[in-house]
Image (tube, helix red, strand yellow):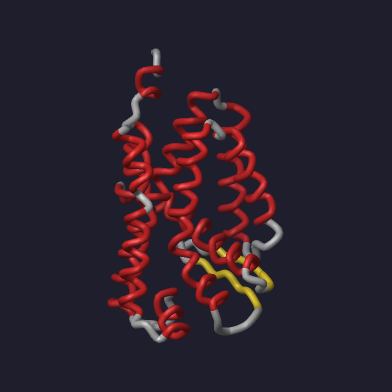
Amino acid sequence: MDLTPLLDSPWLPPAVGAALVAVPTAWRFSRHAVTLVHELGHAGVAVATGRRLNGISLHADTSGLTVSRGKPRGPGMVATAAAGYLAPSVVGLLLITAVRLGWVLEALWVALGLLALTLVFIRNLFGLLVVLVAGAAVAATAYRADADLQVVVVESAAWFWLLAAPRTVVELWAHRRRRRTGTSDADVLARLTHLPPAVWNLVLLVLTLAALWPAVDRLLD
């Protein structure tokens, strides 16, 4: 069976990405990939702003925790707290850019390197499993898939993270209204900046929705 027409369809990547976000059974598993990127967002910005990264934990309920040490307030801490929910959008935009520039294989190598580095900071067994599964998927795509399939996989991943980002922000809103624990990223940002958590929730939602435009533009081009 010739799959070339299917692989050449510009609608395949957004369809795959949307399915991974919208289908409950798929989301139950793919949500762990979002948590991984979310925590790596916290970790990357923490290091970039001069904080010391202590470790990352990923849990079976799709929650996660990144621990870093440094100043408890200030721009660096605000950026670190805000980075988690924005990280999937950033990854999606980087992958879309890689596809546009023809750097798909390079993007896979970079992803594999970052996952290998992440292993150093993982602090629990479930987190280790998530990173190893993600690494195996990236390695299989980089070393076993042909060039056309690599493009489809990377662009599908881009759509997945771009669509997952606003969904998780909406989930954050619902989680805060339901539990009111005061420990969410929006609550942390509120304490750091004195802006209400709802304002931060709205800012994150607007930014993650805006990040969809380059992918939509590529699809309609």
The image quadrant of residue 196 is bottom left
- The correct choice, above or below, for 104 with respect to 18 in the image is above
Residue shown at the point (32%, 62%) measured from the top left: 206
Outermost residue to the right = 120
Residue shown at the point (66%, 70%) measured from the top left: 53
* Residue 63 vs residue 34, the one in the foreground: 34
Q: Is residue 150 visible?
A: yes
* Residue 6 vs residue 25, the one in the foreground: 6
Q: Position of residue 195 (x, y in %)?
A: 37, 82
Q: Is residue 61 visible?
A: no
- The correct choice, above or below, for 94 with respect to 186 in the image is above
Q: Position of residue 28 (x, y in %)?
A: 39, 53
* Residue 218 vs residue 86, the one in the foreground: 218
Question: Is 48 on the left-hand or right-hand side of 154?
Answer: right
Q: Position of residue 120 (x, y in %)?
A: 71, 59
Q: Quadrant of the N terminus?
A: top left
**Marker count (numbered):** 0
The image quadrant of residue 10 is top left
- The correct choice, above or below, for 37 with respect to 181 in the image is above
Q: Position of residue 14 (x, y in %)?
A: 34, 38
Residue shown at the point (58%, 84%) measured from the top left: 72
Residue shown at the point (38%, 22%) measured from the top left: 8
* Residue 141 vs residue 136, the one in the foreground: 141
